[in-house]
Every structure is written in structure tokens, then in C-alpha cells.
Image (spheres, grey):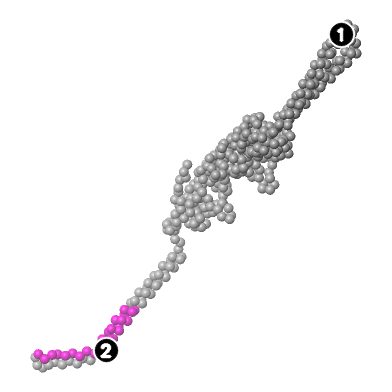
Amino acid sequence: MNYESGVMAEKGDPITVDFDPDEDDRLEKRRTDRRRIIIIAGLIVLGLAIAAYFAMRGGTTTPAGEENAQAPTVTVVRPGRTTVEGEITATGSLAARREMPVGVVGEGGRVVSVPVDAGDWVSQGQVLARIDRSVQSQQVQSFSAQVQVAQSDADLAQANLDRALQLVERGFVSQADVDRLTATRDAAVARVRVAQAQLAELRARNARLDILAPAAGYVLERNVEPGQTVSAGSPPLFRIARGGEMELLARLNEDALASISPGTRAQVRPVGTDKLFTGQVWQVSPIISEQDRQGTARIALSYAPGLRPGGFATATIASGTVVAPILPESAVLSDEDGAYVLIINGEDKAERRAVTTGTVTSKGIVIAEGLNGSERVVLRAGGFLTEGETVRTQLAELDD
């Protein structure tokens, strides 16, 4: 640098110093370059540190505890094994256990009165309908008169025979006359019997004009009205449930039929009501339908106003006891492959397990096959887990 300075000889004169401006620019440039170098070096060091971090991360395994800490938490249960009353659910239609169709058993005719209606209780021999018998009544009177005529002839013949027997000892009447009078008397008595039989037959025919209840029961249908003409070929005029007894014709598959027997208890609930009716199986179908591979279990029921023949009902039939795990409905999932549950294995990973479900009870769904009861089963949200996913578990207790 070039400096020019001058010193005044005299006191008080200023001293001046001259600086080179290019020298300042060079100093500023050096400082800028130094800062740039420092920044670049810092970025290089930072980049190397980041690269080393990712290199170390990629070449090492995350500790199990840290991995589990990041895993979702699910609630699991250990179902164990429970003794459950086996139940079979079936559907079917209600009917009269012993239905009696009642029709015309005589000659028929015009109906003059129908004293009963559907829904009435009737006793054995009670008149259900009366048929006009005005002509038959006249015939009865005619036959009654014929009986009287025949009886009079028989009485006369007997009197003639008695007189002849008194005279035969005196010789006024021969034995041949006695034999003839005896034959006349016997013929007259026979005619009386014929007339009496004809009268009894007519009275029996007239009695059959009344439609009578063959047994005590509950009238299900009435298909006749006063003024209607009926005959022996007419359809049944009444249908009666003998004793008012009903039954449910429950349809069951072959396996279910094999597990029940006559006398098995059942609960029946007609459609449209929550009321239960207790009955018991009284007959198991000896054949299986070739169309649907099902048979019929007939469940006897006592009369009740809520049981209407022809209605639809559901039956729950007891089928003995079973020992099996029970799971809440939320734990059992299903898809096109069938029912399954998600269990948590020893590595805390979700694992699919196919199961066979049994009956549905108030406690949950019986698992017939697939679980032994010691597994940790995902209680809820199983549908949001994927097989093989690592989870943390929280054990819940099932309600008794």
C-alpha cells in the first residue's frame, strides 16, 4: 500500500494519511470466502452424519420392545370351555295334532241350522248342523203304523193258536189245524220283527242327518251355512282339532334329526309374538325328503289362543349338553371362505383361524370346532387387522 503523509512544520497543522481503497475490497472478499467455506464444510459434515445415520438404521434391527411400543393395542379374551345345553333351532308350520274332518255321513239334504262356529269348543256327540227331515219324519210314522199292524196280526194268530190248543184235547180240533195255526202265528211274529227292523233302520238313517262331533275338540273351520244342500259327496263341513291339541311340524336336516328323540323338550315361538310355548317332540320322521334332504320333527303343544294352525313358528329343541368355547358375536367374523376368528400367537402377531360355529346362546356363539379355549382371541375390531400384523394385547374377562 502506498501512504502519503505530511507533517506540518508548524504546530497545529493537521497531519493527513492517504489509504488505498482496493485494499479494503480485498479484505472484504477474504472474509466472504472464509464464511462460504465454513458453511460448505458444515453442510458436508451434516450430510455425512445423515448418511451415516441411515446407513446404521438400515443395517440394524429395531428392538422388539421399541417395535411393540409402536404396534396397535387390541383387546383379547381366552374363552376357555363351557358346558352348554345343546340347542337346535328349526322352523315349521303349526297344525292340529289330530285333525278331524267332519262331513255328511247320511243321505244329506237341506241344512236348516248350524249351531256352532269356528273357534267354538264342542263335546263328543254335540250337534254341529241339522238337516231337514220333514219327509223322513212321515216315513217314520208310516213304518211305526206297519209295526202296529204286524203286531196286531201276531196277537190274533197267537189267540187263535191258544184256543185251538184248548180244543184239541176234546177232539174238536185236529193236530193238523194246530200245526197250521202255529205256523200262522210264527209268520205273524216274523212280520212284526221285520217291521220293527225297518223302523229302526229308518230312525238310524234320520239320526245320521244331524252332523255330530265325533269327539270333543276345538272347531277350526266351518264350511256350511243354513239353506245349503249337502250330500255324502260334499267336502268336509267342519274341521276339528281333537282335544284342542296342536303341533309344530319342524323341518330339520339329517344330523339334527339324529340328535333328538321323542320326549325331547322344545320351546316354540310363533311369528309375530315373543311369547314362548313349551312342548315336546312326540314323533321324529322316519324318512328324509329327497328334494331338500330334510325330515320332520313333530312337536306336541297344548291348546293356547296364540297357536293358530297354518301359522309359522320357530322351535328351539334341546339336544343334550356340549362342552365347547363360547365367544361374543363381535369376535366371530365371516367371509366367502366361512367363519373365522383372529388369534394372537406367541409372537404377538395376528393369525387367522377357521372355526365351525354351533348354536347361539345368551352368552354368545358356541365354537364347535377350531378352538380349544386357550387361545388369545381378538374380541373386537378383528376386521381391521391383517394377518401377520404385530399388536399389543389387553386381556379382557368374559362375563359369566
Helix, strand or loop at mark 2: helix
Q: Magenta segment range? A: 12-37
Q: Is residue 197 above or below residue 29?
A: above
The quarter holding residue 282 reads top right
Q: How crowded is the residue under tag 2: few (<14 C-alpha within 10 Å), some, or many (20+)?
A: few
Amino acid at circle 2: Asp
Q: Is residue 36 located in the magenta-colored stretch of the structure?
A: yes
**Residue position for label 1:** 167
Q: Is residue 338 above or below residue 27?
A: above
Q: Is residue 247 left or right of residue 80?
A: right
Closer to us: 233 or 229: 229
Question: Can residue 388 be seen by looking at this rendering?
Answer: no
Give the distance between the C-alpha atoms of the residues marked 1 and 2, in whole angstroms: 199 Å
Location of residue 113 in the rendering, given as x and y in whole percent from the top left corner: 65, 34
- What secondary structure prevails in the magenta region? helix
Helix, strand or loop at mark 1: helix
- Residue shown at the point (88%, 6%) measured from the top left: 170
**Residue position for label 2:** 22
Residue lying farthest to the left in this orientation: 11
Query: Could you tell which of marks 1 and 2 lies nearer the N-terminus?
Result: 2
